[in-house]
Image (cartoon, rainbow, N blue to C red):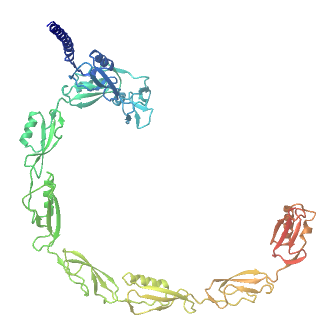
Amino acid sequence: MKHMKFYQSKVNLLLISLVLSLSVLFGFSMQRNLSIETPIRIIDFRSMESDALLAWGRENDIQIKTTEEYSEDVVAGMVISQSSIVGERLYAGSTINVVLSKGPDPEVIVNLIDFTGKDIGEIQLFIEENKLMAAEILFEKSDAIQSAYYIKKNIDAESILRKTPIKFYISTGSRDELTTVSVPDFTEYTRQQISTWSSTNNIKANFVDEFHDTVAAGKVISQSQAANTQVYDGSSITFKMSLGVGVVLENFVGKTKGAIDKFISDNGLKVNYSFSYNATQNNDVGVSMSPNASVRVPNGSTVNVTLSLGKISVSDFTGKTLSQLNAWVSEQNKLGANLKVTSTQDYSATTASGQLISQTPSSGDINPGTTIKASVSKGEGVVVKNFVGGTSTSQEGLKVSTSQTYHASVPSGQVISQSISSGTKVDTNSSISLVVSLGKVNIENKTGQSLDALRSWINAVNGQGANISFSSSSEYSSSVASGAIISQSPSSGSVNPGTSISVVVSKGAGVTIKNFVGGTSTSQSGLNVSLAYEFSDSVAKDVVMSQSRAAGTVVDSGTSISLVVSKGSEPTFVIPDLAGLVAGQSSSVDTSKSIISNYLNSVGATNYSFNTGAYGIGAGMVNSQSPAGGTSIKYNTPIVINLSTN
């Protein structure tokens, strides 16, 4: 039993220890749970700079992880976005990812506009709107540019990087510097009050109208130059003016005029109605609007609405003119009918010329864009008779013109062809052309006349289709003058068109060349004789050796002929030993050439040449010559002299 009690005591002690341990653990757990169950409400970080953001994180045991990126809208160092939305609750120890702005991207490309005519205010606005990082405005005098207006810039490129340094030069006119004007707060100004202030202070006011949910219509939303700052005299300020909340237009297409009128009245708008035919909408139902649906417009604006006239009711113009149909279509098209007219012309024995025989469609309602087909009468018309083979050249109701041509088979006076086939129905007073035959060609004999007379006659008959040609040859004639026709074939009668005439034309009597060779005569009446002279060992001096045209040849008077006349035997001279000529007088090739040339030229020998070689007999000495010295030779005999170079 003691043992049992001891054991029971040990058990009790263990139970007490366990209870105490659980109590401690439970208490710790309760304290921990009470802390976790008080989460932190996340605020909007977008108005905070990075230092304030990190301080908030430390104070609330929230880890802030930041990244950076460029932003066109958020100032550098301010928050662009946060991973936890505003109002969300997080426990201590949680992490929020935040994106911080690095400001505008300096690598962005900015397109430069034409600044001519811009004032300093507009230049400043351009710099601000495009966030140019290194723009500088400088001033200089200018007699040509108005004060406060742009003169030039230091960069000619069409675009630059945002970070690129750029200088704008502004005119101060004739002054050293511009005066300034203090800018008021325009929040409560009207447009008229702003214009008055601007005019008084020589400032240009630029107005931009925008809708705004909180700023009343006609009031200033913002001004490009802040209140209580200074602007230059002559510059500009841009004002964003409120159009008020405005009215968002409903879609009037498919709505009745009554529904449209109600919306217009309920929203303080005005409406301008026009009307147009429409294939799908009933009468007085909207088919288009301007401005379009969902567009916000200022209160009191006028909305242009086109109402449907429905389909077009066709009028029948049968028996009326095409002009009347076209006039009616033109009036309907002014209302959006978009009708088209196509017409054909037909002969009719019952409908007067120019009136509609039929029209399709001619009644009922048609859709816009329909094409109306009309058949217009050309009157009864005239059936062309057969003129070919006859001699008649007229027909009632036709205007007939005729031309004439020679023909191999159709007798003179008969019609060969007509421009409009027989049996064809044509309009009254239509023109038709007939070709009438002149028959065959009567030949005129031009023997004894000039070739030009023949050509003139041929040209005349060919103008009427004779197609006559001719070929000619020429002969000497003692009876027919030069240039006149000796004979013609054929020379008379009638021939078919296309015939060729052959004629022989006289070259006059001519001159028979005598034999000059072997005699001393060098002239002949009717010839132009030229002479050339040559040496001859066989023909005596002044005797003709040859003639350019053979004896007995008949030629035209005035023909040229050449004779070669003998000068007798060619004279000779004895060539000396040229080695002795230069011996003791020359020690060079050039000197020897000069001595020998002078000698040969002096005696009349010109056909000579020199060769040189290393013969070892002394420079300039004659090694050999051909012909040899002492030989009797003619003056044109070739002479070769070989000179030594050493």
Q: Is residue 51 left or right of residue 354?
A: right
Name of the residue lying farthest toward the top? 2
Visible in this render: residue 201?
no
Front-most of residues 413 and 426: 426
Q: Where, quadrant-wise, is the N terminus in this rendering? A: top left
Front-most of residues 320 and 293: 293
Q: Is residue 645 left or right of residue 278?
A: right
Count of numbered tags: 0
Query: Residue 590: x percent and y percent?
Result: 84, 61
Residue 27 image-quadrant placement: top left
Q: Is residue 335 left or right of residue 608?
A: left
Q: Where, quadrant-wise, is the C terminus in this rendering? A: bottom right
Query: Residue 620: x percent and y percent?
Result: 87, 63
The residue lying at 82 percent from left, 76 percent from top is: 637
Visible in this render: residue 614?
yes
Query: Residue 130: x percent and y percent?
Result: 35, 31
Q: Is residue 50 above or below residue 243?
A: above
